[in-house]
Image (cartoon, rainbow, N blue to C red):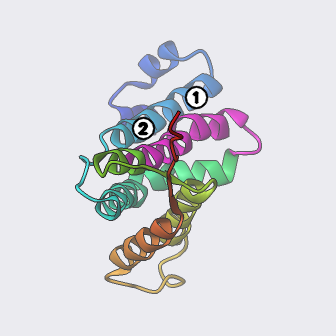
Amino acid sequence: MVAEASGLSSWQLRRSFSNADCLYRATVSSLINQISSRISQGPTSSASVCESIRAFVSHCAQIVEAPSYNRLLYLLIRDGRACPFVNESYEEKILRPMKQGLERAVEDAGRRCGTVIGVRKGAANHLVRTLEIGLAVPRLLPAHVVEAQEDKTERLVSALTAELMAHTFALEFATQAA
């Protein structure tokens, strides 16, 4: 079945990987790299801090809603504790770049406004977890359990944008005259 899905014969698949663990790691790595490349193609900078946050939250929401992210989340839930490789790869190549991307978007927007703006510690992590809980986890549940909400993504993006704006701060340094 795996060989068929990958377009290989079972013989080619056996020759390419020494065991099932190597095949599993290659599959997870490919999935994570696919998602990671989408994260790195972040939105272009916007004129204001609020617009920059909204663009980045919307970008992350699109990634989290993708079927590939659902497959990764399923693997994290199922294998995260038993196979530390899955959790470590997720932390390094998905979670960290998303958090850094938000911080960078806010800092860049602040710089364009002539000030230093930051995001409170933990706000970026909250963004990712809220998107996962709101958009990806429900897709893992049976269809009859999840309520259909047509504009759920847009409402979640709007709510997170407002929440993250509340978690930004400007740093102002007074210079002393000598």
Secondary element type, mark 2: helix
Q: Is residue 112 left or right of residue 10?
A: left
Identified by mark 1, the residue type is Arg
Q: Is residue 113 magenta?
A: no
In the rendered image, the residue lying farthest to the right is 82
In the rendered image, the residue lying farthest to the front is 178
Q: Mark 2 points at which residue?
A: 36
The image shows residue 172 at horizontal and vertical percentages of: 50, 51
The span picked out in magenta is 80-105
Marks 2 and 1, the one that precedes in the sequence:
1
Q: In which quarter of the image is the N terminus?
A: top left
Identified by mark 2, the residue type is Ser
* Circle number at residue 25: 1
The image shows residue 120 at horizontal and vertical percentages of: 59, 56
Residue 119 vertical position relative to residue 152 in the rendered view, above or below = above
Q: Please tell me whether the stretch drawn in magenta is mainly helix, strand or loop.
A: helix
- The residue at the point 60 percent across, 15 percent down is 18
